[in-house]
Image (tube, rainbow, N blue to C red):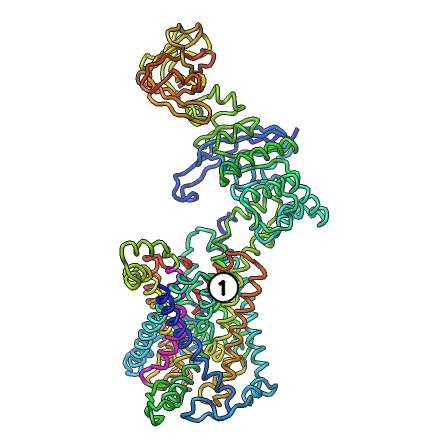
Amino acid sequence: MERRSNLIRLFFFSIVFLVIVFPFLPLLLSSVSFGWQWPNVLPESYSFRAWEYVLAGSSGTWPAVGASLLIAGIVTAVNILLAVPAANALSRNKFTGKWLAEAIIFAPIVIPPFVAVMGIHLTFLRLGLTETIFGVVLAHLSPTLPYMVRAVMISYNTLSVDWEDQARMLGAGPFSRFFHVVLPHLMPGIAAGASLSILISLSQYLITFLIGSGQVVTLPILLFPFISGGDPAIASAYSLLFAGMAILTLLVMDVSLKNYYKNKKASTVKGQQRGVEM
Amino acid sequence: MNDLRIINIKKQFKQTERRGDPAFSLQPIQLTIREGEFFSLLGPSGCGKTTLLKLVAGLLQADSGEIWVGDTNLTKVPSESRKFAMVFQQSLLFPHMSVEDNVAFGLKMQKVGKKQRLDKARAMLERVGLAGYGSRLPDELSGGQQQRVALARALVANPRVLLMDEPFSALDPILREEMRELLGRIQKEFRVTVLFVTHDREEAFYLSDRIGIMNEGELLQVGNARDLYERPASTTAATFLGLKNIIEGTVSDGRFSSIGGNFEFAVNDRFQAGQGFLVLRPEAVELMPNASLPPKGSLHVSGVIQQLRFKHGFYLCKVQVGDEQLECVFSSRQRENATAGQKVDLMVDLKDVWIVEK
Amino acid sequence: MLQKSKPYLLLLPATATIVLLFFGGLFDGLLKSLGYFPAIGKMELDLTAYTGLLGSSDFWESLALTTRVAALSSLIASILGGIIAISLFMLSESAKSGAPRFWQRLFQLPLTIPHLVGGYIIVLLFMQSGFLSKILATAGVIDDISDFPVLVNDPFGWGIIMAYAWKEAPFVSLMIYPVLTRIHSSWRDVSRVFGAKGWQFIREIVLPIIFPAWTIAAFIVFVFTFSAFEVPYLLGVTYPSMLPVYSYQLYTSGTLADRPEALAVNIILAALTILLGLAVYFFSKRWNVLKGWN
């Protein structure tokens, strides 16, 4: 029995190494390489040249990071405002046409959003929305909003109306009820939805490129020329930075959530939410 | 006087609103609960008692009727401004707030200053036996403690009426008795008017000044525990109060006679002539000593003991009398000369006999 | 009255946003795919773009490639994801510590990585002069760069398939794992009483239980891969290209005449994904898989 479970563990660790750790090795090595000829398994010499370039002020990395975060931030804030009432309606009411509302809101999960963006591109051009941050924010809304609604709905499902009734009986009016009772309960869902929304917004390339027309430079826009045939060291450094940003977003959300709400419910909501990520 | 008056409150649910259930309606209900009174609504689940409670709370909108407290008509006043308090089946403590913040929540809504409301909250916690628990989170308390906090939270703002919806039904039996005592004591101390909903008749009997029995959306009978138990107004009420000895018969010429003819006795003018049901409380049925004559003014039947069961402190005995089965309660001493299968004579003092009109 | 209209009012902002920005875009695209360009004075609708498209071999080759890549990616991702989920399950069964949670997080890593980065990782690993090739050369298995097969920017789409298999395998395992945790440890004891060995336990109990969730997860990966742009754009070849890339190439080719065709590709793509999405929805409802979703 003991040997068996050791065998399982060994098998498991080799999978972890092969599938998770190993793929990152060339990325890491390449980012600090200074010339890396075939067939050497390790670079001939190392340097932080690529990192210096990426992190230096002249490369435009920081404005791109700023633009990415600004867009993701606005998109997420708007999503929260739109999603909370919508999730309330969808998870707490039965009404005619509910299936239609659900179909509309969740359609961008199934139908690729670039189809809509390409379709609306010329209209945006006419309205002067292309090449603007505002236009890009509008374009990022539909791919992200469904996930936010989904996440908040899961939180609403676990909030029985009794809680609000209880608050009412203690003299709380509509606003007090929302801020003291409903919002704290929704927080884990909102945080999960926000991390998804930020993550999805951060990694959009095509949509940003179509609407931003190269004028709105986010990190993926900056990164693309490098990874499609540019300097591999710089491409690797940018890739690591980009991936790091995404992971950091999730970690920050995760930690702030834990501090906010040390409840088991939170972790199940998060767990479920992870399932929505693609 | 700040009596709570429920005037012709009526509510009809369409089939769609209560999924799976048939359409349900609450018949017009008229009820006055006196200030400081402990009033229980007792009935099986689905009888509409919780609906009535929520109508009083304003959490549901009545189709017609009014709610008054004293001279104030509260019918159109939203729940949050009625100055009522409510304790639900679940404690519903806000999980992100400490225990004392929970208790102080109602005062906070009334814009009471922080220090003052926390002082009051701590004092209230002490009253329910939870001194020193204020800074904990609700998660860290047991179910019984949570319900105590819920009670403290409801009482701290001096509500006009305290509404309670089966507040102890989720607790285990020993805890339930403890909470019952605590609630009884605190209600007397605060002289708060309580409208209490339960399906547990022992709980209702223990706590209430008066009880209203509800069934299928109707208020069947209102009275104190003893009145209801000894003089139920209908067989439904009698059944729900746990009275099993209900025997159909007729009253004519000052005499009751059961359909099978086994029960026959003089009722004089106490009950109206017509068809009715004889209701015999199990503890009113006595074993007659062997070979003695029934005393005057008592009902006398004989039957065969079917079953004897020891319950805490007494014996529950089922006796077959003709087609009817009588349930009676014997003390251990009485039981000594009775065994299953034995033929026995039983008597009931006519003062303890009750007949319900059909 | 207010009670009745409340849900509609609450839904209005979100649905209006999606209707305006998303369905508006789809409709805009549909009109333009039918040749409606008021800007150049063309108001009448025709099916030129669609007939042109359906008559071109480029389109059919693109569709074939897209289907093949999506099918293989979802197949490999689901096998890999299944293995991960079952090993995680076995690990959490044998060790009672909180370690599995850590491993779970680690496995979600590829899911968090942006697609472009995931694609680039595949480039560095699998290109002819890539990391694997270097390892094989050093080990003496291959002698020349050209001995290593073309796996990136190849006409078959291996690079794309590997990128998605890697990125979506954790997704599949995430879909399966909650189902696995529903397997009560006592079932294992019961099956042991009946004499089931480890492998039999997996075959007779574990696999049948996870099968519905597994199928749905694979299907979702299929739909997703079918309509994704970034990775095929990075790892594919110019011809044949996957449908979204094909559409993009047409759209940015410069000639205005190609734009209706690009949008027609999009509309066909959208129609196909709707059909696939409905199929996923139907089966998941029927099998009651996506509990958290509905």
Mark 1 nearby-residue class (10 Å; few <14, some 14–19, many ≥20) = many
B319 or A149: nearer the viewer = B319
Name the side, left or right, on which A219 lies relative to B13. Answer: right
Image point (54%, 48%), residue name: A163
Which element carries disc 1, helix, strand or loop? helix
Q: Position of residue B112 (x, y in %)?
A: 70, 47
Query: Magenta stretch: residue C279 in it?
Result: no
Query: Magenta stretch: residue C163 in it?
Result: yes
Q: Quadrant of the N terminus of chain A?
A: bottom left
- The image quadrant of residue C77 is bottom left
Whether residue A63 appears in this view of the structure is yes
Q: Position of residue C74 (x, y in %)?
A: 34, 72
C226 or B277: nearer the viewer = B277
- The image quadrant of residue A169 is top right
Q: Main secondary structure of the magenta part?
A: helix
Magenta stretch bounds: C155-180
Name the side, left or right, on which B182 lies relative to C267. Answer: right
Q: Position of residue A207 (x, y in %)?
A: 47, 76
Residue B102's place in the image compared with C289, above or below, is above
Q: Which residue is mark 1?
A: A148
Q: Quadrant of the C terminus of chain A?
A: bottom left
User: Count the marks: how many?
Assistant: 1
Q: Position of residue A275 (x, y in %)?
A: 43, 64
At label 1, which amino acid type do we have? Met
Image mark 1: chain: A
B253 or A22: nearer the viewer = A22
Residue B302's place in the image compared with A132, above or below, is above
Name the side, left or right, on which B77 lies relative to A162. Answer: right
Whether residue B281 appears in this view of the structure is no
